[in-house]
Image: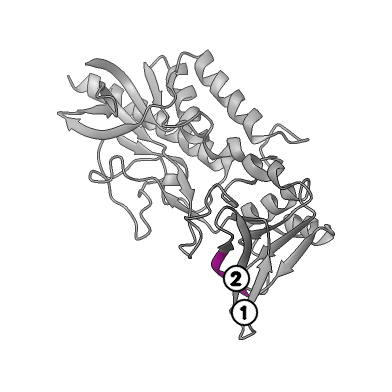
Amino acid sequence: MRTIDIAIVGAGPAGLTAALYASRARASTVVFERGIPGGQIVTTDWIENYPGFPKGLSGQELGDLMLAQAEEFGAEVKPFTNITSIRPEDLDFVVTTEDGEEYLARAVIIATGAIPKKLGVPGEAEYTGRGVSWCATCDGALYKDKTVCVVGGGDAAVEEALFLTKFAARVHIIHRRDELRATKCIQERCFENEKIEMQWSRVVSAIEGDGSKVTGALLHSTSGADDLLLPVDGVFIFVGVDPVNEVGQELVDLNENGYIKIDHDGRTSWPGLYAAGDVTDSDLKQVITAAAKGASAAFEALRFIDEKVCAV
């Protein structure tokens, strides 16, 4: 079993920032990521509200920069490595990978993030990958000169709709209310775009197809109007996220929605176990807040380790 100072589960902005701070403090740090480093930001077309980049940059670029900086200070990042359990061992933790490898860590930071919610309607599962998507950056180019719809009314939904106008001939935004929840400046860009058409006060009740691909979305009215079958070639879903809380959930307290409860500095209810980023119950879920919480969690983990050493 390999012994390390800090194990970080998740290599999004929170995890990579925690790795930067921990490794810069000369703590042996290993970051475990079940996919590719960068987290959800690598599927984001453009980020314009991260300080230091006045002209903006792509999510992939920002993720690559964060990864490079963490590795520059000595953090070891292990992509495509799924953590199956975190087990207390005296005052330390045994972190086990899907391949059965075990690491004895003196502190652990959970930064597993969140995943997009599903609608749970007929046709969604059947046509996933055949017209149903949760990533406009990944799949948008497949819909050149076609008609698509975006489900949702927050920042992510509207930004992805704007991105899709680079390819699609028409983009419908389907929102259950009669006004968007997105930030005003994003709304302004949306309403100025001639390719975008709003479908107010409607929800998707089913996704239609011909057996091989999506052909339409059945829209139910929330205001008493008749149902509408909207012909589309693709359905992009952005209706919120669910926390990825499977690892360590038996050790820490969760809120009613499954997010890990933390204090201001990233402490969970279990000593030596910290959390940061979208998996936590923090209200604002942005790249900058994830990074800030990752830094706080790393600082507290380092202090926890130092206090254990002094107590020996």
Which residue lies at the image location 44% right of the left edge and 35% below the top edge? 296
Question: Quick check: is 57 in the magenta stretch?
Answer: no
Q: How many marks?
A: 2
152 or 166, nearer to the observer: 166
Dot 2: element: strand
Q: Quadrant of the N terminus?
A: top left
Q: Which residue is mark 2?
A: 218
Dot 1: element: loop
Q: Quadrant of residue 188?
A: bottom right
As drawn, which residue projects farthest toward the front? 211
Q: Position of residue 246 (x, y in %)?
A: 31, 44
Q: Residues within 10 Å of mark 2 (few under 14, many from 20)?
A: some
Q: Between disc 1 and disc 2, whose residue precedes? A: 2
Residue numbers of the magenta segment? 201-207
Q: Amino acid at mark 1?
A: Asp
Q: Quadrant of the C terminus?
A: top left
Which residue lies at the image location 37% right of the left edge and 46% below the top edge? 263
Asked if residue 230 is positioned above or below residue 276 in the image, the reply reads below
